[in-house]
Amino acid sequence: MPKRTLARPTVTPFVVAYDDEQAGSLDDLTIEFTPTPRLAYRDMQPDDRDRAGVLWARIERTSRKGKPIYNSMNTERQREAMYDLLCQVCSEPASRNKDGWLFLDWQTPQDPPTWPEGSLTNMPPLCVECARLAVEECPHADLFVPLRVKLPRLWGVSGVQYRWTENGWKTYGSIPWLRYGDERLPAVLASQLIRELCKVTVIDLP
Ligand SMILES: [Zn+2]
C-alpha cells in the first residue's frame, strides 16, 4: 500500500513542544557543593533531579495550546513519556507484548553496527494505533523501522553543559548523548531522557 504523506498531521503528539512554552531562567541556577561543585536551582523542587542526581531543565509554563513545533520536544513531557514508557503521541501506556515495548526507530550514522540492537533513542515508545498514525502521517515515515524492545535501558540524557565563572554559570554547548555516570553530568542541565534499545526484534506493524 502506498504511503500517504499529509501536509499537516491530524494529531499533535504529546511530546511536541509549543511556541508559548517558556524555559526556566538562567538566573534560577546556582552552585551546590556536595562537596564537589554541581549545578543546582536556588529553590530545589522534588523533580528537579532524577534518580541519578542529574539536574533537569525547567519549563516555566506548559500549555499545549500555542503553535506546535514539530521538530522539538517539551522537556517535561518527553521525560515523563520516556521514563514511564508512555505512548509519545497519546500519553497512554505504550504497547507491550511478550517481545517487549513498541518503538519506531531509524538508523543514523552514529548508530552501532549492531543496529537496531544497542541503539540509543530519545523517542519514547508508542501504542499500536499511534504507531500506525505516525507511519501514515510523518514525513520521515519511510525511514521508520517498527521494533519490539524487551529491555529499553535507561542510558543517559541530552542536555546543555555549563561552566562556572566568577559571574555565575555560563552555557558551554549542548551534548546530545551523555551516559549516566559521565564525569561532566554535575555541570549539565538535562533536557531529554535517552534509552538504549536492548533485546530488539524487528517486526511488521500489526
Ligand atoms: Zn498512542
Image (spheres, grey):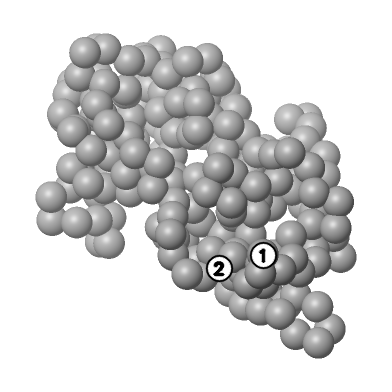
> Of helix, strand and loop, which one carries label 2?
strand
Disc 1 or disc 2, which is closer to the eye?
A: 1
Q: Position of residue 162 (x, y in %)?
A: 65, 73
Question: Disc 1 or 2, which lies upstream in sequence?
Answer: 1
Residue drawn 24% across the image and 56% down it: 111
Q: Position of residue 191 (x, y in %)?
A: 60, 51
Q: CA distance from mark 1 to mark 2?
A: 24 Å
Q: Is mark 2 within 8 Å of ligand 1?
A: no
Q: Is residue 144 left or right of residue 117?
A: right
Near mark 1 (Cα within 10 A), the count class, few <14, some 14-19 or many ≥20, is few
> What quarter of the picture does the N terminus occupy?
top left
Q: Is residue 124 left or right of residue 53?
A: left
Residue drawn 27% across the image and 62% down it: 110
Q: Is residue 204 above or below residue 142?
A: above
Q: Is residue 91 above or below residue 13?
A: above
As drawn, the label of residue 122 is none
Q: Position of residue 155 (x, y in %)?
A: 38, 48
As drawn, the label of residue 34 is 1
Q: Is residue 197 left or right of residue 173?
A: left
Residue to which mark 2 is pinned: 174
Residue drawn 20% across the image and 19% down it: 99
Q: Is 67 in front, or is 89? A: 89
